[in-house]
Image (spheres, rainbow, N blue to C red):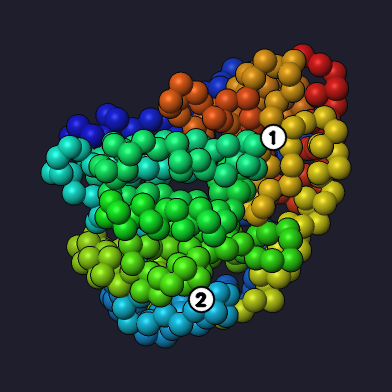
Amino acid sequence: MNPLLAKLQPYPFARLRELFAGVTPDPAHPPISLGIGEPKHATPAFIKDALGESLDTLSVYPATAGELPLRQAFTDWVQRRYGLALDPTTQVLPVNGSREALFALAQTVIDASAKPGPVVVSPNPFYQIYEGAALLAGAEPWYAPSVPERNFAVDWGSVPAEIWARTQLVYVCSPGNPTGAVMPLPEWEKLFELADRHDFVIASDECYSEIYFRDEPPLGGLEAAARLGRGDFRRLVALTSLSKRSNVPGLRSGFVAGDASVLKQFLLYRTYHGSAMSGAVAAASIAAWGDELHVVDNRAQYRAKFAAVMPLLEPVLDVRLPDASFYLWAGVPEAWDGDDTAFARALYAQYNVTVLPGSYLARDAQGANPGRGRVRMALVASTKECVEAARRIVQFVQQGR
């Protein structure tokens, strides 16, 4: 067996099941899960129709690079969303959801033979795929902490010079999971300068970019690069997905865009990896990327949900409206002494509401775990369920430990 597999840590949801083992929730309360970030809004009918009408393509092997109409759908969306003109033949590729692409990109980029050993820099807390991708590529993860005083923006300045010198890949998550923070232009400028100096690739995970609460949409990595005169998008790959934007997590569809030289090597890797998107999924994806009305409606549903929940939770928890995404990153009350796991377990036992301990989404690094003392709440259930969950959380907090 690959010895690197032994370095992988249990996935947060496996740890959550272990935490809840032996607990029987109060049967007076129907279960409400805010634990998993799986969209629950209805999949638009026109996307399902496009999928069903293209099933005859299942008799044909799909091209790994995707057909031109699919790649054109990607670049058309980038043009509308960010005002950028990308080459559909060299600067975009289809992927089977951003998760597999985030993993595969590390396998493409990392040179495990480099001396001293290669490093992958990741936010902390983070999406666990970043860590697994780094480890299985033969690299060492380095965790850059989020800073509560800056609405949980990542402190890239905390990374030592000797780590940057070994870095081959940096994962950016903006809007962030679990914090919802959006990286501003000066931070992008800092990261691009570091990438040029140390010759590493930036992977910008942007799967939450279309769920936001203010008038101005979140800044994207490609957009930041263009504003800073980097129209070739050198050393940058942005990754996005239909899962959250269009409520199709089971479709497993997204795309990557950016540096053509990196994507050329990524396509080579994917050709051998066998990661082509089926024609039926491609047809549904073209339909989804071509329509914004359902995205506006989806965003409105999340805005209504947060507007209903925030006034309930803000008086009893350390929580604020995120820049974007569908998560709340809440601090547990002082009575719990920062014990996010005990808080989550007791809430589940007494009120049958599931939240994810923040410490499960972060690592102990530089003497601290920046997720400890916080819980992640995914407001993916119906507005009625989210409001009911918030009311139960208020009761739970007010009764004390």
Instruction: Answer whether residue 376 is visible to the viewer in this image.
Output: no
Amino acid on which the number 1 mark rests in the picture: Ala
The x and y percentages for residue 268 are 21, 66
Residue appearing at x 75%, y 15% in the figure: 335
Residue appearing at x 57%, y 63% in the figure: 219
Real-space Cα separation, disc 2 to disc 1, in angstroms: 33 Å
Residue appearing at x 66%, y 70% in the figure: 295
Residue appearing at x 28%, y 51% in the figure: 198
Front residue of 102/371: it is 371
Classify residue 2 as left or right of residue 36: left
Relative height, residue 323 to residue 356 (above, below): below
Relative height, residue 365 to residue 334 (above, below): below
Residue at numbered disc 1:
330
Density class for disc 2 (Cα within 10 Å; few <14, some 14-19, many ≥20) is some
**Residue 282 occupies which quadrant of the picture?**
bottom left
The x and y percentages for residue 132 are 35, 40
The x and y percentages for residue 49 are 57, 78
Residue at numbered disc 2:
78
Classify residue 170 as left or right of residue 216: left
Q: Secondary structure at mark 2?
A: helix
The x and y percentages for residue 259 are 33, 69
